Image (cartoon, helix red, strand yellow):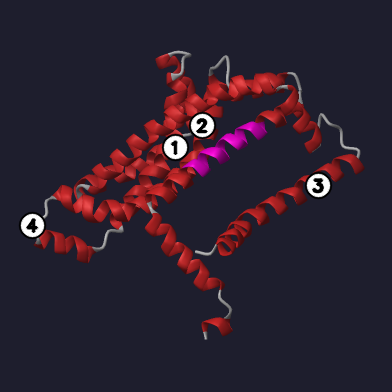
Amino acid sequence: MAPNSKARRIGARVLPPVIFALIVLTAWQLYVEWGNVRESTLPPPTAIAESIWDNRTMLAENAWVTIKEILIGFAVAIVIGVGVATLIRSSQKIERAVYPWLVVSQMIPIPAIAPILVIWTGFDMRPKVMVIALVSFFPIAVNTIDGLRAAEPELLNLLKTLKANAWQRFRKAQLPAALPFLFSGLKVAAAFSVIGAVFAEWVGASEGLGYLILVLNNQTATTDMFAVIVVLALIGISLFLIVSLIERLMLPWYYESRQVEAEGLELEPEEVA
């Protein structure tokens, strides 16, 4: 791949969201200044940036607490989600029995469960990790199940003909087909894990960004609350990008096929002809 072509491709991906963000932030700043909006109602982006810098030590300390909870809960969600998906796809009887209850489990509001988990386990990290795992495991499990279903029947039949056992069929056919779906679920779960951490810290915590939001809300410190929200968003974006990077490293063939497909769609009609 030529360096110029690679640079253009990176620029085509990075510049549009950056330009859009600058437009939104500029419009936000002008609206607050020209509309005489009170800072306690909607602070301008410049005030939020100043708050982040002034409170950087407090934000960093509480962010580290939240990040630890997110990483542990996310890891637990991966283990449970992949394990449940593999179990469900191991047998049609198990799938018919368990899959509906997997869906039903998501109909229970997680914020309603969080206080019960605190009662059961106390005010340490355990209920927070459990809430994050409960919020995050569902997209991982469902996407992995769909991925295991996506294995080519012809390949599975060929492996059966060659006397391959269940593990060999899983490793050679089902797992490669499931990996792109799994990473799609991981990206969704990355966002959910941040939401779960905030819910968990609202219920019972003495530190963390979610707890900090409650404290600042009681003080009506709107600008500082926005600063915390920005940090939470950056954590979610970072986790999403890390998952995307791991996906790219583990599935180069998948990225290459998508890249070729995207380039084909971008061709002009006369170029295709």
Residue at point 22% right, 45% down? 94
- Cα distance in 3D space between marks 1 and 2: 8 Å
Q: Which SS class for mark 3?
A: helix
Which numbered disc, 2 or 4, marks the residue closer to the eye?
4
User: Which image quarter: residue 85?
Assistant: top left
- Cα distance in 3D space between marks 3 and 2: 31 Å
Q: Disc 3, disc 2: CB below 8 Å?
A: no
Which label's residue is closer to the chain start, 3 or 2? 3
- Cα distance in 3D space between marks 2 and 4: 45 Å
Residue 204 visible in rendering: yes
Q: Is residue 201 above or below residue 25?
A: above
User: Which image quarter: residue 221?
Assistant: top right
Which label's residue is closer to the chain start, 4 or 1? 1
Q: Which SS class for mark 4?
A: loop
Residue 168 falls inside the magenta stretch: no
Residue bearing the label numbered 4: 163
Residue 240 falls inside the magenta stretch: yes
Question: What span is in magenta?
Answer: 229-242
Q: In this orientation, which residue lies closer to the viewer: 117 or 49? A: 49
The location of residue 84, given as percent across then percent down, is 29, 40
Q: Disc 1, disc 2: CB below 8 Å?
A: yes
Q: Is residue 239 above or below residue 149?
A: above
Residue 42 visible in rendering: no
Residue bearing the label numbered 2: 196
Q: Is residue 244 left or right of residue 10?
A: left
The location of residue 168, given as percent across then percent down, is 16, 51
Kind of residue sitting beneath label 2 = Gly
Q: Is residue 106 above or below residue 178?
A: above
Residue at point 62% right, 23% down? 60
Q: Which SS class for mark 2?
A: helix
Residue bearing the label numbered 1: 136
Residue bearing the label numbered 3: 26
